[in-house]
Image (tube, helix red, strand yellow):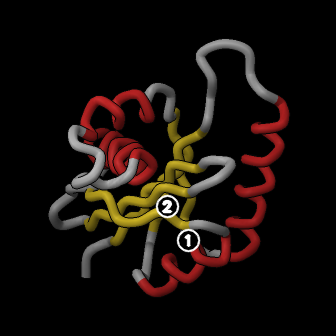
Amino acid sequence: MFMKYLGIDWGEKRIGLALADGETRLALPFATAANFNELLKIIQEEEIDEIVIGHPLKMKDSNMAVNKQFSAFMDLLKKNTAVSLILIDERLSSKAADALEGNKKEKHGRDEVAAMLILQDYLDKVV
């Protein structure tokens, strides 16, 4: 059985998700979780082995409120899952997602595409 990966583009309002497996090593946009409980349900239902999370680092001054919220999110994940968690730099992933979106009415949302880019970056470098 191949590993299943979940990519996460964490945001204060939404959590963009992407899926991949160890066989294809191809990340695909999946869904947008509205809250933490929905995310936990997806992790369980999809039988995720490893989670790759975009670390919201800023190009300039960091926002302490965002850092605290992200740290709280990470703490919740650690407490509520036994899945391996990998943090990677997500700078510019949302801008890259915007460039890929095309016709917004027919495409996946920005958060899902950003999660796909985060996960694919990890898969290309590590897996």
Q: Residue at x 57, y 72 (%)?
A: 39
Q: Residue at x 21, y 57 (%)?
A: 25
**Marks 2/1: CA distance?**
7 Å
Residue wearing tag 1: 83
Q: Is residue 116 above or below residue 43?
A: above
Q: Quarter-wise, where is residue 46 in the image?
A: bottom left
The image quadrant where one finds the N terminus is bottom left
* Residue 27 in view here: yes
Residue wearing tag 2: 51
Residue 66 percent location from the top left of the image: 76, 38
Q: Residue at x 25, y 36 (%)?
A: 100
Give the total of numbered labels: 2
Residue 44 percent location from the top left of the image: 51, 84
Q: Earlier in the sequence, mark 2 or mark 1?
A: 2
> Contact, CB < 8 Å: mark 2 with mark 1?
yes
| Number of other residues with Cα within 10 Å of mark 2, as a class: few under 14, some 14 to 19, many 20 or more | many
Residue type at tag 2: Ile
Q: Residue at x 45, y 26 (%)?
A: 92
Q: Is residue 33 above or below residue 46?
A: above
Q: Is residue 94 above or below residue 54?
A: above
Seen from the viewer's position, the closer of residues 22 and 8 is 8
